[in-house]
Amino acid sequence: MKRKTFVTLSLVPAIGILASLALVSVAGAVWFALMNRTLRSSDYEFVGAYNFLRLLRDKRFFNALEISAIWEVVTVTGTLVLAVLLAVLIYETVKKPLWRNLICFAFLVPVLLPRVAAAFIWRFLYSPSLGLINYLCGLVGIGPVEFLADPSLALISVAIVDIWQWGLFFTVILLKLMETLPRDPIEAAMLDNARTWEIHAYVTLPMLKAPIISLALVKAVESLRSFDLIFVMTGGGPGTATETLDLYAYQMGINMGGRISYASAMSILLLIVTTVVFTIIWKAGKKWAA
Amino acid sequence: MKRTSLLLGTALCALAAQAQAQQTQAQEACKGAVPTLNVIGQGMPAVTALDAHLSEFNEKWDTEVKITLLGENERRAKARLDASTGAGSYQVLYIDEANLAEYVSADWIYPLADVVPESYDIADFRTDLSNVATVDGTQYFAPFVGGGDVMMVRTDLLEAAGLDVPSTLDELVEAVKVLDAADNGAHGWAARGQRGSGMNVWRWTPFFRAMGGEWLDGDMPAFNSEAGVEATELYTDLMSYGPPGVGTFNWSDAVEAFRGGQVAILIESDVFGPWMEDPSKSTVVGKVGYAPPPDPLPSAGWAHGWAVSKAGAADDCAKTIAGDFVGWATSKEMEQQRLEAGIASDIGRTSTLESEAYQSLVPAEYVEAMLATGPKTDLLIMKSPAWPEIGDTLGLALEEVFTGTRDDIAATLDEAAFFAEDSLMRLK
């Protein structure tokens, strides 16, 4: 058997299973989206594009779209900025391998926590009357701050938990990548009397451009799946201040009216938007990394 | 006369013996036929207390009872999804007043008398709870907890401020303001703010009803009336005397704040009264007074209980075992065992309320308040299958007002009513 045939035959079953799983669920969602199915009744009929047209008149849908976009930008940017800053800081200040490894181990703990557990811990930390953060704020004369009940603070407060979980994990990855970089360009920059920040800004980080882009994409995909974190911490509230698209689809389809056709239409639109946006970002990223 | 009595007695004995024989027959036929009995529940004391006794039931039917515990909103969503899609993963469902109409109209659950053996004495369930569990004369779930509202006040703080227990709404508002302003370490008030038909809407509804509000005007939603606006204004105003974050409080947050000593006055479901007297969890034991909600506030009647799912228990044995579980879990014996374990909050049976064991566990003032609240208690929510959707939409609107996202109350309620119109139309 030729190598190419062997590779093809090995891949076909896995790709076949993945494709059929994806296609069946997408086809099911499209079918639901074209009906007026609700959970309350087994009767339904074909309504064509009604659900999609109704979405275009739904203010709450556009609010959810906006919140989702803000969530993506804040969590991806915040995670990467935190990871880069901490990785550089540890790289420059902690030289002993043992200490570095201990710090890396500690930084892995948050991402190993189940999202729901992390959400509950932080919900308690944020509590205006019993939480540690508000206690510390009180010591410096601030607050009590309603982190999760104030519409202007709720989204950023939840985003901080996401950044805490993933930023520390990405710090470990970046730190390990920095340790594998060739020393010659860095030493050359040092001989040219470059300052520390200049070495990282112009030498080490540009060398890590491709992995950082990959990390950004991984985080962007992961951020789309933050339903559990937001659901436990705020349930989408106060009001609709933290209601992302997946949360709104859940509220519409299961929690509220049981309008599963409407929720399916929302999911299809979300699928289309994310596919288009991610394809554009992926192509731009590849061009930039080249 | 004697002969008639004798004949009647003999007939009753024969009927009882026949029922017993039928039950034994069913037990023999179905023992081991259902390896797992799946139950969806909510973490109320009556549910978690079952853990200690499950082996007894498992042995009886050679089955394994698995209880999935979820938060209130999640439990409602999951049970509804399971029943509506016909998935039938759960044989026993946890039902409450808010979704009963929907479950009955969609034919998702069996009438209670069709599944629970007579030996469990259905007639002994508290009348107020059975009424909530009944649609068109048929009872659908076996209640194990429920009741109405009770006002809980910190008597020590009231006394220090020279105030009496409020008996009118005006007095309540005045007392809340005075107690909040006093240097006593407590906020004047707490209430549910988090969205949900069973959350903020539940607690807001007595205020709405007290203002003369009606849910419907003919077939059209009418909660955006003047009464709705006034109730929301007052509720929002009272929340400004609550602990930080009260705008998104659920019932647990409100109750914990009160028994943590942070709140002076709380109107909540009467089931939480005994929670205040638990020395292991409450810092206000012996400092709490109980009274009916001040006039003209009515009391929101509610009940939670077990029902058997038609999708989950489609075959005879599943139906038999699920029905027996419902009867067993809500039996007189189970309630007495709970009392022995010190759990006095969840009472579904009249015989338990009348028992010495119960009366020795709760303050006499609490029982008096419960009895005085009885005549004011009614099911205050909209009795419609569309209620979960309408209630949740209204809850979202109220949360937006409570947290300051929106300040035009009339416009916010108009929007919720517009959505409700759509929900009601879909019913037709």
Image (cartoon, rainbow, N blue to C red):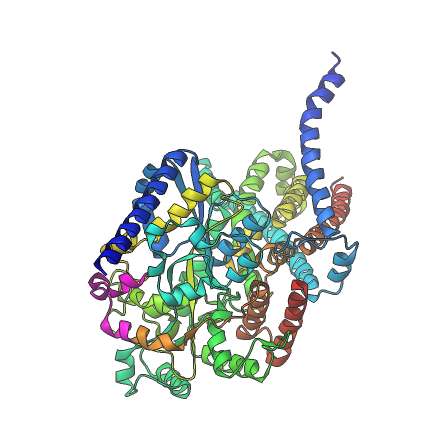
Q: Quadrant of the N terminus of chain B?
A: bottom left
* Residue B156 coordinates in the image, percent (x, y): 26, 79
* Residue A138 coordinates in the image, percent (x, y): 41, 69
Reply above or below: A155 against B319. Answer: below
Q: Nearer the viewer, residue A29 or A190?
A: A29
Reply above or below: B141 against B131. Answer: above
Task: Identify the residue at horizontal 76%, vertical 57% (top origin).
Answer: A52
Q: Is residue A136 visible?
A: no
Please tell me whether residue B420 belongs to the stretch shown in magenta. Answer: no
Going by the picture, which residue comes out furthest to the top? A1
* Residue A86 coordinates in the image, percent (x, y): 54, 48
Q: Nearer the viewer, residue A277 or B246?
A: B246
- The answer to whether residue A240 is left or right of residue B357 is right
- Magenta span: helix, strand or loop, mainly? helix
Reply above or below: B283 against A8. Answer: below
* Residue B422 coordinates in the image, percent (x, y): 68, 67
Q: Nearer the viewer, residue A50 or B33?
A: B33
Please tell me whether residue B350 belongs to the stretch shown in magenta. Answer: yes
Q: Is residue A111 visible?
A: yes
Point out the stretch of residues depicted in magenta. Answer: B349-368
Q: Quadrant of the C terminus of chain B?
A: bottom right
Q: How many marks?
A: 0
- The answer to whether residue A114 is left or right of residue B275 is right
Reply above or below: B146 against B325. Answer: below
